[in-house]
Structure formats: structure tokens, C-alpha cells
Amino acid sequence: MEQDKSEQAQQETQSSYIKMKKFKFVMLLFFLVFLTAGITTFALAFGDEKAVNVGVTERSEFQKLYEAYDKLNQNYYKDLDQDKLVNGAINGMIDSVGDPYSDYMNEEEAKKFQESISSSFEGIGAEIQEKDGYISIVSPIKGSPAEKAGLQPNDIITKVDDKSIQGMSVTDAVLLIRGEKGTKVTLTIQRPGQDKPMEVTITRDEIPIETVYAEMKDNGVAEIQITSFSENTYKELTEALNEMNDKGMKKLVLDLRQNPGGLLDQAVKISNLFVPEGEVLFQVKDSNGKVEKYVSESGQKVEVPTAVLVDEGSASAAEILSAAVSESNDIPLIGTKTFGKGTVQTAETFKDGSNMKFTTAKWLTPKGNWIHEKGIKPDVEVKMPDYAQLPYINPDKELKEEDLSDSVKTAEQMLKALDLDPGKVDGYYDADTTAAVKEFQGENDLEVTGTLNGETILKLMTDLREKLKENDPQLKKAIEVLNKDQ
């Protein structure tokens, strides 16, 4: 009995000791946590600024950027928009690269860009690029106000509504040029080979992204034009091919003129249609010199004899397709040398919807050629007639007898190209010019005044485009080459 009491007392003592040890341990742990928190708070409040970098890899190369940001925020004479500061810093980094194909777009600009490749947008309908501080036309979109106004590849836009855009980014220029349907924008254009700039007033319109146009010519020759590579281009092309097959297509002219490029995946899918399985479509060379080859896969193939039309407005994805069919399937290229864009861009979208597009690699032709800033030389070179390069005449400005100007000279050249006789082509609006204008107005049921006003000028330019289409020397040569190879 005594032994039991003794054991019970011993157990109670041990239990009390254990409880005491647990209590001390908990208190000690609490004290350590409290002490650590206190030290951290003190360090953050009074210690060196580096304390904020605990657990974060320090990037010393950004210290100068942080300092500049803080100085502006703290000392600028008025409140600053922090988002604008950050966007400006990213823009500055991209601009410093010196690459016209790398760009940063804020949320609004990124949204507009996405619209331009997916559905439709409102504007003038022209692909532009920045090069050496200038904004220039890569290519106008087929049927767009820009094309109707006579804008051409390599035209330099110096002003938008009398505001200089020299040194401006592409995205900033686009925001000025685009606008609501029905509104007007005046571009000051410097065309290569011309001494004086010209003003072109264009009425903005909705630009639908329909990219494939098909037409059956004589003797089973189908002409299919691809104006750009957007989300549905491959689908549009296969539908056009099926339609032309149903109409008895025996030969095909694929028209890539004035095609500024677009989505790479669409160009790859379309290249597959024209290149035998297993043949190289193009190659990509990254910054480390590693080269990856992309080859044609099995599937639907175009079996009829084909020729491809190219010109100085054929760029980027259009050049990838041109090089693929030329070097991997001996399909002849006809026209003039292409634009020469041999780089690949990657787009990174940030959480706020903004977007950074930058060059990540070079693309090479199937035979390993880099065509950047050199272009692709066609197998058969055929130039367009001189009148295809004539500048735009502003229909808002009236031209009349006794006037002397470059616009008068352009009008005389147009009249002559339409087989009318304006007399000496010298820029002087004389009696012969008046007679030619009257003849043109009479033939087209216009008011016969002998004066070049808006309606007459627009009709003059429209008829010239129609004549060029009907007497297209590059298309005629392509059909000739196909018939010869038969």
C-alpha cells in the first residue's frame, strides 16, 4: 500500500516536471518569435535599405533605374502617372535595341493591334514600319482607302494632319493615323525619287480582314491573291482553291504582291500546300547560332502548275512562303525583288493586357539564305509601267487652266497613260490640257468644264488603276511562263 502511494507521488512529480518543461518551451519559443519580429521591424524601419531585399535576388543592374524612378516620383514638380513611367521605361529599353520590328504596346495599343489581325478595324488600311527614325509604308491593303489613294511601298509619312511624326514609334503613329469611319486624315508623303513631298487626304473606312481573293481567268488559269496572313487566311485559301477546282482550274497564279506578311503559322500551313512532304519550308537561327529546320508535312497539296507573283511590298511571311515554294519545289517567282524582312518576332503579353513584341531569331530560306534587307530576287523580273508609280492628286484641290504645279504634271501623265493628249507634259495647265480633260469628262458622263475638280480627279485615278489591272504585265508574264512549261 505504501509502495503504491510512493509510486503515485513519483508519477505526479514527473508529470508536473513535464508540464513545467512544456510551459517553459512554449514561452521560450514565443519569446524568440517576438524577438525576431522586433529585430526585423527595427531593421526595416531604421536599418539600411538593403533589408528590403531579404529573400529576393538583388539585380544591381537595375539600381540606376530604381534611383531615377524614385527621384522623379519624389521630386518632380507635379504628380506623375506611375503606369506611364513604367511604360516609358519599357519603351525606352525596346527603342534602345534599334530594331524596327521590336515594339512595346500598352493595353489600348495591344487591343488595336489584335483587332488588326483578327476581325476588322477602322482606318486607312496600310501596313507601316519605322526605319531610321521615319515611318514608311510597307504595303497598302487591297481595296483599302490607302490603296485607292495611291499609297505605295516605301512611301515615307513625314506628317499626320500637319503634325511631324519623325522619330515616333509605329504604335504612336498608328494611333494618329487610325480613326473612326468617315473621318479624314491628311498625310504628308515623301516618295523616293521625288523632290517635293505631297499631301494625301484619305477618308477612313472600315477595313475588313478578308485576305484571299480568287478569280478564274481564260484557259483554266486561276488567279488567287493573298493580301496578308491573318487568323483565317489558310481557311480562306483552301476554300478558294476548292472553288477554283470546281470551275476547272488547270494552272494557278498565286499573287503575293503588296502582301506585308502577318501570322507565321498561317504562312507555314499555306507553304505545306505547295511543298512536297519532307522538304524544308524554312529555317530558324536563334541567338546562340542553333538552327532548327521546319519541314513540310503530309496532307492536302496543290497539284496544278503554279507561279508566284512578288514585288517590293511582299514582306515577312509572304517572303517565307515565296522562298519555300521557290527553293523546295521550283515554283517560279515573277515580278520584282521582295521587301527583305528576315527576322522572327515573339510577343509577350503582360497581366494588364499590354504587349511586348521583340525579335528573337533570324529565319533562313530552305537553302540557308538570309534575305534580311536584301529581299528575294524573282526568277523572272518584270517591272510595272511607269504610270503605276504616279503620285496621288488631292481631289479637294481644283486644278484649272494657267495653273503650274507638280499636281498638274501628274494629271498630264495620267491623261497620257489613258491615251489622251494633254500636249507637252511639263506641269503647265495649257489649252491642250484643258482639251484633254474635256474629252475625258465627256467620255465618262461628267460635267464638261475642262477643269480638274474632285469628281474628275477621282475618276481619273480610278480609271488608271483599272487599266493597270487589265494590262498587268507581271500577271501576263506569269501566265506565259506557265503555258511555256506545259
Image (cartoon, grey):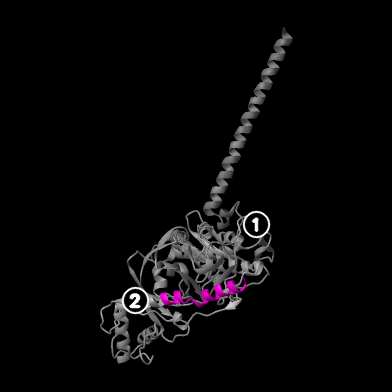
Asked whether residue 481 is drawn in magenta, I would say yes
The stretch of residues the image draws in magenta is: 466-486
Residue 29 is situated, as x and y percent measured from the top left of the image, at 61, 36
As drawn, the label of residue 297 is: 1
Quarter of the image where one finds residue 414? bottom left
204 vs 6, nearest the viewer: 204
* Residue sitting farthest toward the right: 3
Judged from the image, the secondary structure of the residue bearing numbered disc 2 is: helix
Judged from the image, the secondary structure of the residue bearing numbered disc 1 is: loop
Residue 269 is situated, as x and y percent measured from the top left of the image, at 58, 59
Residue 70 visible (yes or no): no
Quarter of the image where one finds residue 426? bottom left
At label 2, the amino acid type is: Lys
Task: Answer few, some or many: residues within 10 Å of disc 2's Cα (few below 14, many 20 plus, some between 14 and 19).
Answer: some
Asked whether residue 483 is drawn in magenta, I would say yes
As drawn, the label of residue 416 is: none
Q: Decide whether the magenta segment is chiefly helix, strand or loop.
A: helix
